[in-house]
Amino acid sequence: MVKKENPKRLPANRSSSRHMQGRRERRSAETRERLFRGALDLFARKGFTETTVEDITEAADVGQGTFFNYFPSKDHILLAFGEMQLAKLESAVAQARASRECMPHFLRSLGVRMTQEPIRNPGIIRTLLQAYLSTTPVREGMLNLQKRVHALHTEIVLLGQERGEIRRDLPAAEIAHVFRQTIFGTLLFWSLHGDASLHARIESAFNVLWSGLAPRKVEVAQPEAAAAEALLAGVPLFTCGD
C-alpha cells in the first residue's frame, strides 16, 4: 500500500520554505548594503584608486570572495550608486506629475533632494568624476546612466512648459541639458572645497539659472534693469501664483 502524504502538512511546508527564502533574501540584501556603504565610505576617505576589494570586505566584515557575488568589480559600486540616484530622480518625476507644486519650487527642492547623503561628500563627488574620466568598462555604463538622467530632466522641463511655468521658446532637451550641467558643475566646484556651502551654492546657481528659464513677466521697456534687480535681490523673475 502506498502511503499518502498528509495534505494538511503541505501548506505548512510551503510556508516554511517561503520563510527561509525570505530570510536568505534579507540577509543577501543586508550583505550587499554593507559592501555598498562600506565602499562609499572608503572611497570618500581613502580615494577610489587607493581602496582595494580587501579593504571593502574588511569594512563589511565578509570574506573577500563574497564581494564578487554582488559586484563584478569595485568600479561597479559606482554604477550601483548611480542607479540609486536615478531611482531618486524617477521618484521625483512621479511626484512632480502627481502634485501641483509649481516648477520653481520643485526644481529648487530637487537640487537639495539629489544632494542628500551619501552624495553630500566631496570625496564621493571626486570619485564619480574620476569614473567619468576613466577608461574603465564602467565608463560606458556611467554614460548610459547620464542619458537616462537627461531623459528624466527633459520630462520635468516638458511638464513645466505644459503648465506655462518654463519658457517654451527653447527645446526641453536643451534646457534639461543646461540644468544638469549647472548642478553637476556646482557639485564639482564645491567638491574642491568640501565645506558647508553646498546648498547655498545650489541655491545661488538655481536663482541665476531660473532667470533664464522662467516666462518673462517684466516690462519690455527696461528688461535688463528688471533682470539685474531681480538677480541682485536673489528673487527669480517668475514666482508661483503670478
Image (spheres, rainbow, N blue to C red):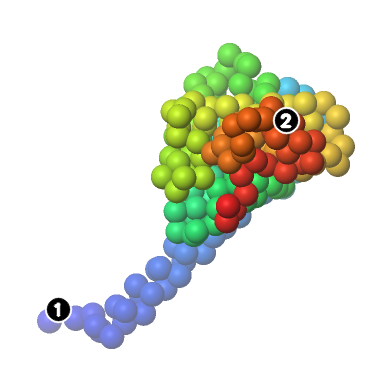
| Quadrant position of the N terminus in the picture | bottom left
Residue beneath the point at 51% across and 45% down: 165
Badge number at residue 50: none
Q: Is residue 11 left or right of residue 51?
A: left
Q: Earlier in the sequence, mark 2 or mark 1?
A: 1
Q: Is residue 195 visible?
A: yes
Image quadrant where residue 193 sits: top right
Identify the amino acid type marked 2: Ala
Between 240 and 218, which is closer to the camera in this rendering? 218
Outermost residue toward the front in this view:
221
Query: Considering only vertical position in the picture, is 31 above or below 98?
Result: above
Q: Position of residue 122 (x, y in %)?
A: 78, 33
Q: Position of residue 96 (x, y in %)?
A: 50, 53
Q: Which residue is the site of mark 1?
A: 2
Q: Which residue is the site of mark 2?
A: 225
Q: Of helix, strand and loop, which one carries label 2?
A: helix
Between 188 and 99, which is closer to the camera in this rendering? 99
Query: Considering only vertical position in the picture, is 72 above or below 203?
Result: above
Residue beneath the point at 14% across and 78% down: 2
Query: Considering only vertical position in the picture, is 188 above or below 231?
Result: above
Q: Position of residue 111 (x, y in %)?
A: 65, 43
Q: Are marks 2 and 1 in contact (CB under 8 Å)?
A: no
Between 21 and 119, which is closer to the camera in this rendering? 119
Residue beneath the point at 80% across and 36% down: 232
Around disc 1, counting alpha carbons within 10 Å, would you say few (fewer than 14), some (14 to 19), or many (20 or more)?
Answer: few
Q: Of helix, strand and loop, which one carries label 1?
A: loop
